[in-house]
Amino acid sequence: KLPDIVGLFGTPFHIYDEAGIRETGEHMKQAFAGVRFQEFFAAKALPNPRILKIVNDLGFGFDCSSIPEVVMAREAGASPENIMFTSNNTSKEEFEVALSAGGCRLNLDDVTLIKKVPKPFPKEIWFRYNPGSRRTGNSIIGNPVEAKYGITHEQLHEAYAAAAEH
C-alpha cells in the first residue's frame, strides 16, 4: 500500500496507527484506574488536529504551552477543565485569551506570573513544582536542580500567598 500512499500524498508524510493509539490510551487508563489520575497530553508533542481529537475521545486532557495549542485543544472538543495552560514568559494578553471561551486551568511555573493573571482571578490555580535537590533525576527527566522551570519548595508559600492575595 505504501506506493499508493506516496502516489496520493507525496512525500514526506507521517502515518499514525489510530487503533494503536486508542489501545495504548485504554491500557494507560486501566493502569491508573485505581487512583485519582488525569492524563494531560503535551499538545506540543504532536499538534495534529486528528490526533488531538483521538486524545480527547480517550478522555485525556491537554497540557498546552501556547495559545495556538489551547485553541487546538478546544477545537478537538476539550472542556475547560481538560485544558491546562502551562506557559512561560506569558503576557497578560495571553492569559486573557487562555481564560476566555470558557477558560482553562492555569498551571504557573513562576511566581512572577501571578501578577499577570487577569481578574477575576480563577478559583483554582495550579503551580508547576520543581523539587530541586529534594529529588533525584535520571537520564530521561534530567536533574531537577538543573531545571529552569517550576516553583521551588522554598517558593511554595510565597506563591500560594500571592495567588490568594491576587
Image (cartoon, grey):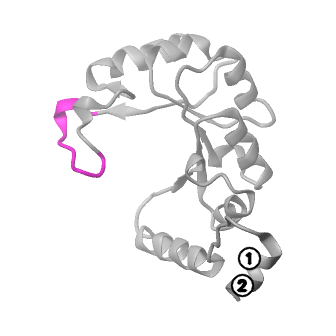
Helix, strand or loop status at disc 2: helix
How far across and down, in percent of the image, does residue 85 sit? 60, 36
How far across and down, in percent of the image, does residue 87 sit? 55, 30
Is there a contact, CB below 8 Å, between mark 2 and mark 1?
yes
Numbered circle sitting on residue 6: 1
Query: Is residue 121 shown to the viewer in this render?
Result: yes
Apparent side of residue 143 relative to residue 3 in the rendered image (left or right): left
How far across and down, in percent of the image, does residue 164 sit? 51, 16
Which class describes the residues within 10 Å of circle 1: few (<14), some (14-19), or many (20+)? few
**In the rendered image, which quarter is residue 161 located in?**
top left
Query: Is residue 119 shown to the viewer in this render?
Result: no
Q: Relative to 140, does residue 91 appear above or below in the rendering?
A: above
Q: What stretch is highlighted in magenta?
A: 131-141
**In the rendered image, which quarter is residue 68 located in?**
top right
Q: Main secondary structure of the magenta part?
A: loop
Apparent side of residue 30 relative to residue 8 in the rendered image (left or right): left
From the image, tell me which residue sits under label 2.
3
Give the residue at x 75% y 27%: 97
Say which of 13 and 19 sits in front: 13
Distance between the alpha carbons at the discs numbered 2 and 1: 5 Å
Q: Relative to 124, does residue 91 appear above or below in the rendering?
A: above
**In the rendered image, which quarter is residue 13 located in?**
bottom right
Placement of the C terminus among the 4 image quadrants:
top right
Give the residue at x 64% y 20%: 121
Q: Relative to 94, does residue 84 appear above or below in the rendering?
A: below
